[in-house]
Amino acid sequence: MEEDAAVILSLIKELAEYEHLSHEVAATENDIRKTLFGERPFAETLIGEYEGLPISFALFFHNFSTFVGKPGIYLEDLYVQPAHRGKGFGSKMLAHIAALARERDCGRFEWSVLNWNTPAIRTYENLDASPMKEWILYRLSGEALNKLADKSG
């Protein structure tokens, strides 16, 4: 819900701090409102609560597999506050998104994980998730993105 924008941004900032990437957070509460709850939402968010307080979030969106011929779900972020880790909150959120993927007839449910995040990797392996070791993630952002976009004519 749109009124959750501040909570979502706060949890995003906590995640960035955990990942040592706080310096990369440029999102504002207005950005969250516009891109998640605006005229054309680009992603969906789950907020996990414990005793009425937000303690986790998952942000995901649809992609498409040309080989499978079906949509998929890509999990951009999953975060559980440190005091609540190891209690199954993250696994519950993953299970909920997996159920959405099945309900929406998706062929895949995918995500990335930092290679040093061994607790998360263990969780994913316990769920029988498979690392896609033959794929390398590439990214264009900032000046590199603008440089390529300028070539579109």
Image (cartoon, rainbow, N blue to C red):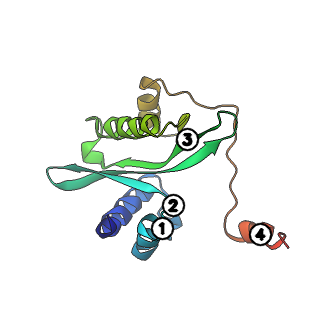
Give the residue at mark 2.
Answer: 42
Crowdedness near tag 2: few (<14), some (14–19) or many (≥20) residues, C-alpha within 10 Å: few
**Viewer-nearest residue: 46 or 147:** 46
Crowdedness near tag 3: few (<14), some (14–19) or many (≥20) residues, C-alpha within 10 Å: many
Q: Indicate left or right for 134 with 83 as reference.
A: right
Q: Residue at x 48, y 56 (%)?
A: 20
Crowdedness near tag 1: few (<14), some (14–19) or many (≥20) residues, C-alpha within 10 Å: some
State the image coordinates of residue 18 (x, y, percent, origin top left).
41, 53
Per the rendering, the mark at residue 9 is none
Q: Residue furthest left?
A: 51
What amino acid does circle 1 point to?
Thr
What amino acid does circle 2 point to?
Phe
> Disc 1, disc 2: CB below 8 Å?
yes
Q: Indicate left or right for 101 with 11 as reference.
A: right
Q: Residue at x 70, y 34 (%)?
A: 67
Q: Residue at x 48, y 57 (%)?
A: 43
State the image coordinates of residue 79 (x, y, percent, origin top left).
38, 49
Give the residue at mark 1.
Answer: 35
Label whose residue precedes the other's in the sequence (4 or 1): 1
Label whose residue precedes the other's in the sequence (1 or 2): 1
Give the residue at mark 3.
Answer: 72
Give the residue at mark 4.
Answer: 149
